[in-house]
Every structure is written in C-alpha cells, then in structure tokens.
Amino acid sequence: MIVIFETDNFTVETLAQKPHVDRNDGGHILIIPKKPVEDLTKLNSSLAKELTKLVMVAGEAMKEVLNQHGVDIGVINYQENGNWSVFAPHGPHLHVHLYGRAISAKTQKYGEALYFPKPETGFYDKNKPLTQEDISGIKKEIERLLQTEKYKSF
C-alpha cells in the first residue's frame, strides 16, 4: 500500500501492485480507518462525517487528476467491501474502495458492473497501479480541495 493522504483517523491509499482496477481502466484507491472497525455502523458521528468527507474529496481529486493524466474517467464507483475477510481471523473490516470508471476501459468496461474474482485467481496480476505522478497529483488536489469552501465548512 502507498499512502496518498492521511488524517489522524484515516488513510487514503492505493495498491502498489495488483489493484482491483487497472490504472488505464480507471484506477483504484482505498480509504481505511487507522483504528480497525467492523463496519460503518461502528463509527461515531464525527468519524462517519470525516470518512464521508474523505470519500468525497478523494473521489473528486481522483477523477480530476486522472483525467488530466489521460485516463478518461466518466464516474467513480464507491464501495464498502468486507466480503473477502469475513472468514479471516480478524473478520470483516471497514474500508471504502474508490474505483475509477474510464470510458475507454478494456477489462472493467464502462457502464457494466465491476467484476471482482478472488485474488488467488490471478485476475489482478497484470493490473497496473497508479503512477507516482498520479499519486502526487491526487495528494495535491486533495489538499487543495480541503481548503475550498465546500470542504472547509463540511
């Protein structure tokens, strides 16, 4: 994992390898609480508000920056998944995935449901992660957006 941005309570990260969605198909970002929590219902209102704000600002930054970098993002899919870890010793844990949906996507086609087989199938092995330029741009855009009236008063 590569940390893009963090607050006292959450990290905005991307996978260094094998993202669920290839960069050219739209990319993949996660928002993860620093203190593990089972699901959204276990957050207090302050943390829930902070998470919502981060999801919004990260999605806006992801779409803006990747479009500037030649990935034609039409929309972002926001998903809270915990399915794969339900039988793990630690159990399910809250994390929100942001999946960019590129209009020109080759594998995760725009306008169709995303497909997520288990990692051991090898489906994600050739997926390209976000570039360092993407990551730096997204971080700067998150920082800029947080200073706008929309997010300062959130």
Image (spheres, grey):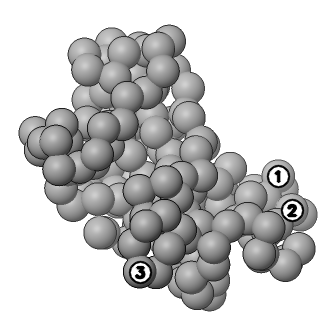
C-alpha separation, residue under disc 2 versus residue under disc 3? 36 Å
> Quadrant location of the N terminus?
bottom left
Q: Give whichever of 93, 52 is nearer the camera.
A: 93
Q: Is residue 76 above or below residue 74?
A: below
- State the residue position of label 2: 154
At a point 43% along the width and 27% down the height, the residue shown is 114
Mark in the foreground, 1 or 3 = 3
Could one spot residue 3 in this view of the protein? Answer: yes
Counting residues from the start of the chain, the first of labels 1 and 3 encountered is 3
- State the residue position of label 3: 89
Type of residue at label 1? Lys
Residue 145, given in percent of the width and then of the height, sits at: 65, 55
Counting residues from the start of the chain, the first of labels 2 and 3 encountered is 3
At a point 36% along the width and 15% down the height, the residue shown is 109
Q: Quadrant of residue 149?
A: bottom right
Q: Say left or right for 76 vs 145.
A: left
Q: Are marks 1 and 3 in contact (CB under 8 Å)?
A: no
At a point 21% along the width and 61% down the height, the residue shown is 16
Q: Residues within 10 Å of mark 1 (few under 14, many from 20)?
A: few
- State the residue position of label 1: 150
Type of residue at label 2? Phe
Residue 112, given in percent of the width and then of the height, sits at: 47, 14
Q: Residues within 10 Å of mark 2 (few under 14, many from 20)?
A: few
* Element at label 2: loop
C-alpha separation, residue under disc 1 versus residue under disc 3? 40 Å
C-alpha separation, residue under disc 2 versus residue under disc 1? 7 Å
Q: Are marks 2 and 1 in contact (CB under 8 Å)?
A: yes
Q: Is residue 110 above or below residue 80?
A: above
Type of residue at label 3? Pro
Residue 141, given in percent of the width and then of the height, sits at: 52, 54
Q: Say left or right for 118 vs 51.
A: left
